Image: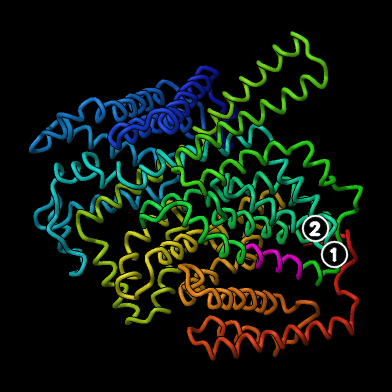
Amino acid sequence: MAEDMGRPTQPRLVLRAIAIIGIALSLFQLYAAGIQPLGLFYQRPIHLGFILTLCFLIYPVTKDRPRGAFGWAIDGVLILGGILVGYWVPANIDAIANAIFPRTQDVAVGVVTTLLVLEASRRAIGPTITVIGAVFIVYAFAGNRGELPFLADWLPGILNHRGYSLDRLASQLTLGAEGIYGIPLGVAATFIFIFVLFGAFLEVTGAGKFFIDLAYATTGRQRGGPAKAAVIASAGMGSISGSAIANVVTTGAFTIPLMKRLGYRPAQAGGIEAAASTGGQIMPPLMGAGAFLISEFTRTPYIDIVMISIFPAFLYFGTVYLLVHIAAVKRGLEGLPAEDLPRARDVLREGWHFLLPLGVLVWLLVAGYSPMRVGFFAIVAVVASAVLRALLAFFREGPTRPRAAALLRAGVAKTMEALELGARNAVAVSVACALAGIIVGVVGLTGLGLKFSSMMIAFSGGNLVLALLLVVIASLILGMGLPVTAAYIVLIILIGPALTEEFGIPLLVAHLVVFWWSQDSNVTPPVALAGFAGAAIANASPMETSVQAWKFAKGLYLVPLFMVFNEPIIVGGPVPLVLWNGLLAILALTAFAAAIEGHLFAPMPHWQRGLAALATLAVFWPSVPIEAVGALAIVLLIARNIAVARRSPVPEGPPAHVPEES
């Protein structure tokens, strides 16, 4: 398998070692998921040992050049350290559990484990999250009784604490279930990995192309068809891929060139793809890694998280879809010719078997199976459907022994490729979860979460709107250097208690809000990672593309606010109230999209745009009379806009299929 972009090609022996270890890790995870579940202190350390070993093989210390003797001298020691991490706790679990005080050798291995996690995060993710983890460790040592007592004078009074020794911190981080081996890594080692592997099997068997072709077949002839296809395809693939950036480069390779050909500006095409791909992370059933983490933190059944998240995700993608449509109407764009598009019937005939694993996945979730077992059987269903399709083709084209042997070799090769790809794709998220465990462990040891909650209340003055604004700012700052998963964990640990206990937001709603806002670094300048990926494919300015992505992804900010101020639609309530709130949400997001673009069915003058923005705010206001006034204003604005469009049906903008220079 090809090495990561931007890294030197590794020797064949190293690539083979990566493949063997990756396949072994995937088989171990499949065994634990579907055959013999393992205990906490067996599965998590072994998983981490595999991940660390893979990380140091994939990401050499000599980043920009091949590893020489010096590089192998460093990485060889780190790889052995990764093996030690995977071996130590399972092999010594009885001695560790029965020890009254931490043994010296256990503390030493704990220090090694922590240092290896920090170095792995630096290589696989970047320096920012590593620095944050190191700062938390230093914070634990500060205080009068800690290893670094002189730092106590530098801490503000509210952040001061007693300080902790090396033995105490190492025990907290590596000898219990509150540090590195805590909930984040536990979720990564069970639910997340098995679904990342599921996505790898779908990718290897060609599901990505199937979903993209199906999206084009259903929307390609509409106005702005390729952009709408990007929204639909990204909704399908984003949840499976677990990464907005991976989603951009996968679906964007097809959608962005077609959007440019249709007439969208390059930056606009890249921004649309980035916004749609980011939405894949909040799209059930998988929601990247978020659904599993939310379920574990809130002790809410996974299927409940999925069901609750369907309508908010629909609102987000509906907003992106509407903005795309408005942009197409403003520019006078038409769809692609029918002869340039695949036929839905042909696409379904060729790829119907890709729907079987998704059907199995949904059926098992509804039936109440555990997510890990659901992932296992979903992978089995992918393999079974691929085998079924291959057998049908085999007998249709005439069975022969050479063809049977070739078919078997191809099947084994694809299976090995998927097992390796799944392990590779899981490295970054597992390392992020392990490092998040360091932060969680320090927060639990020092009581930092309660201190942050007190600070948040003080800064906001007890005002919920100001508190939510602080959450948005914090999520944006953290997201500039942390992956979505890590940003969500850090935020919910630090400010979650304040949202639930002081401001009265229901626990599940608070987690969903923080998780949604943790995505904003993908599309918000100056650091918009998904936007930058879209810009590279579109050959556009990264900053301009990021601004476009930010504009099209506005639902990422508004829908969480709607969750907070209209919680019956999320946590359940009387059916009439739920339907009323759902209608309000659709109206508000429609008005907001029109206010941003200055156009709906026809151009909107500035006073109408201002009124639409005010009406949107009124709909979000937690008062039924004010909501009703806002909803009535939006309905009247839409009706007037439709009337204007009927009197002036000729669209504005350049003719279709004529790209405009950026």
Amino acid bearing label 1:
Leu
Q: Which residues are magenta?
A: 317-326
Q: Is residue 253 visible?
A: yes
Question: Residue 225: which disc?
Answer: 2
Q: Main secondary structure of the magenta part?
A: helix
User: For the residue carrying disc 2, how many other residues have a C-alpha within 10 Å: few (<14), some (14-19), or many (20+)?
Assistant: many
Give the residue displayed 12% in from the left and 32% down from the top. Answer: 104
Mark seen at residue 38: none
Marks 1 and 2 close (CB-CB < 8 Å)? no
Which part of the image, by quadrant, shows the C terminus? Answer: bottom right
Looking at this rendering, what residue extends furthest in the top direction? 401
- Rendered residue at 29%/38% (across/down): 115
> Circle 1 is placed at which residue position?
333
Q: Quadrant of residue 532?
A: bottom right
In the picture provided, is 264 more to the left or to the right than 484? right
Tell me the quarter of the picture where residue 576 sits: bottom right
Name the spot of residue 655 as percent of width and height, x first. Answer: 90, 66
Q: From the viewer's perspective, is residue 630 above or below residue 147?
A: below
Q: In the image, residue 57 lies at what x, y percent?
A: 45, 27
For label 2, the SS is: helix
Whole-percent x, y for residue 347 in the image? 79, 41
Q: Residues within 10 Å of mark 1 (few under 14, many from 20)?
A: many
Looking at the rendered structure, the secondary structure element under dot 1 is: loop
Q: Residue at x 51, y 55 (%)?
A: 306
Q: Is residue 71 left or right of residue 259?
A: left
Q: If the image is split into quadrants, where does the N terminus sit? A: top right
**Which percent across, then down, holds residue 381?**
59, 33
Q: Nearer the viewer, residue 478 or 185?
A: 185
As shown in the figure, which amino acid type bears the numbered disc 2?
Gly
Pick whichever of labels 1 and 2 is earlier in the sequence: 2
Residue 210 vs residue 381, the one in the foreground: 381
